[in-house]
Image (cartoon, rainbow, N blue to C red):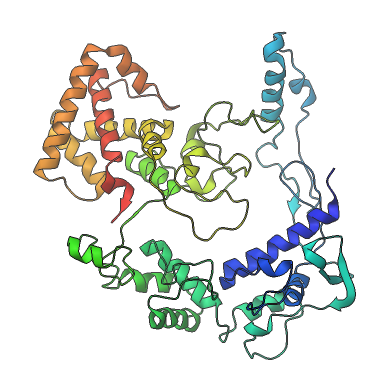
Amino acid sequence: GSIPEEWRTANVVDRVDTFSTVFMGLTIECARCHDHKYDPISQKEYYQLFSYFNNIAEWGVGPNDGNSPPFIEVPKSWPHLSPDEDRLIPPDPVQLRNARKDAGNGLRRPQAGSPSTVMVMSELDQPRETYLLVRGQYNVPDKSELLQPAIPASLDTGAGENPTNRLELAQWLVHPNHPLTARVAVNRLWQQFFGIGLVQSSENFGSQGTPPSHPDLLDYLAVELVENGWDIRAIQKQVLLSSTYQQTSAVASELFQQDPKNRYLMRGPRVRLPGFVLRDQALAVSGLLVDKIGGPSTKPYMPPKIWRAISNNTYSQDKGEQLFRRSLYTYWRRTIPPPTMMNFNAAAREVCIVRTERTNTPLQALTLMNNKVFVESARFLAQRMIKQSQADVQKQIRYGFQLACGRPPSDAETKVLMKAHSQFADQFRRDKPSALQLLSIGETPRDDSIDLSDHAAMTMTASLILNLDETITKE
């Protein structure tokens, strides 16, 4: 079975590693087990840092519902579920168990406006004792020395007293003399805009990481961030309005060969969009995106029965506008992350990841062409295109291209798309059932006022536009 203390220790270790990676760009987890000859952070210093997070009131093992104690108890208003949950189900031996799971999974939810419990993080009244763990094992503490909270000597900012608790540790992080926090923050912002940070290894600012390509620029932006009160928006505006960012991404081949990764900023950034942005972009271009802010997680389309192999519960897909909320709100289960996101190199969220790899695989093309949300987005984009100009197909195509790419298509591009549309139209006029099948994908009904064959042909054309390299790439 699970040993609570083992899991509690693992939770604290995870917090230490996340803290160091996110805020300081350091990989200090190796110091958990033993000292390293050339590592400035010793095992003892690791567990002194560990001590800051070791005083949290928590158990090692919590309930199997995604929440971890402690909780604040608040009044609950749950409906009486047992009669509904035990309602009669057709006695089919094969379907009985799954039907019961479906019923329970859908009903065991608080009703709208019903309060429940809230997870909190509080300090223990009596601090836990922290010792160095021999080989990092939770059950082998070295009790020869009781460790107190302290920052590593190599990171001393000269700000005075050593932080004694998590609040003071947070204040130490944002002290103007701190050598890493501001640099790590602006480097990650730069990475979002350019696809690669000034320090390429954004998760590792240590001796084993890559040196900054423009150290003076990194220092300048870090100082700007601190002196402007850590105003993220101001730094973003400064970067976006710079002539460096506003360069074209198209360059001569000889310049590209000299600097293939654009480390010297010879050109503007050009990177494939992340999976969550691709989904949001398709929904936005089609007019389906619901931009409501806040609220609980949403459960958009997922492959059928994908949870059955791992989970005791079933995936209860949302309905209506919840299907088209921003990907930011997508329900994420770490054992079964959304396949659409994972195909585009999303982090699984099992541990903190500040930089993901960017790959190019056939699965990505298949996702963009066949995934339900992208097909439905193409259908609604086609609907927008047709309604923009009822009789002129060329105007419809140019309008859709403008929506997706932010510019009008060239004559050559228009000619290619017109030819493809003509082929699709001929195909669907001969095969009405296939047209109906295509237009039936997705939960939102199609507009019956549009001719079936015309709608299907324009849907395929819209899908082509949504799959263009220029559409899925920031350039």
Specify the quadrant of the image occupied by residue 41.
Answer: bottom right
Find the residue positioned furthest to the top. Answer: 91
Residue 84 in percent (x, y) is at: 74, 21
Nearest to the observer: residue 226 or residue 192: 192
Q: Where is residue 207, by image quadrant?
A: bottom right
Q: Is residue 94 above or below residue 193?
A: above
* The C terminus: image quadrant: bottom left
The image shows residue 360 at horizontal and vertical percentages of 38, 46
Q: Position of residue 470 (x, y in %)?
A: 26, 48
Q: Residue at x 42, y 30 (%)?
A: 372
With respect to residue 106, does 50 lie above or below? below
Residue shown at the point (63%, 82%) measured from the top left: 155
> Could you tell me residue 296's position as x and y percent?
60, 45
Q: Residue furthest front?
A: 37
Q: Residue at the location (81% across, 61% down)?
A: 137
Any part of residue 122 in sight:
no
Left or right side of 260 for 34? right
Residue 340 or 409: which is nearer the viewer? 340
Q: Quadrant of the N terminus?
A: top right
Exactly how many numbered labels are in the figure?
0
Side (left or right) of 426 relative to 367: left
Between 45 and 218, the one lying in front of the other is 45
Residue 33 appearing in the image: yes
Using the rendered view, name the quadrant where residue 53 is placed: bottom right
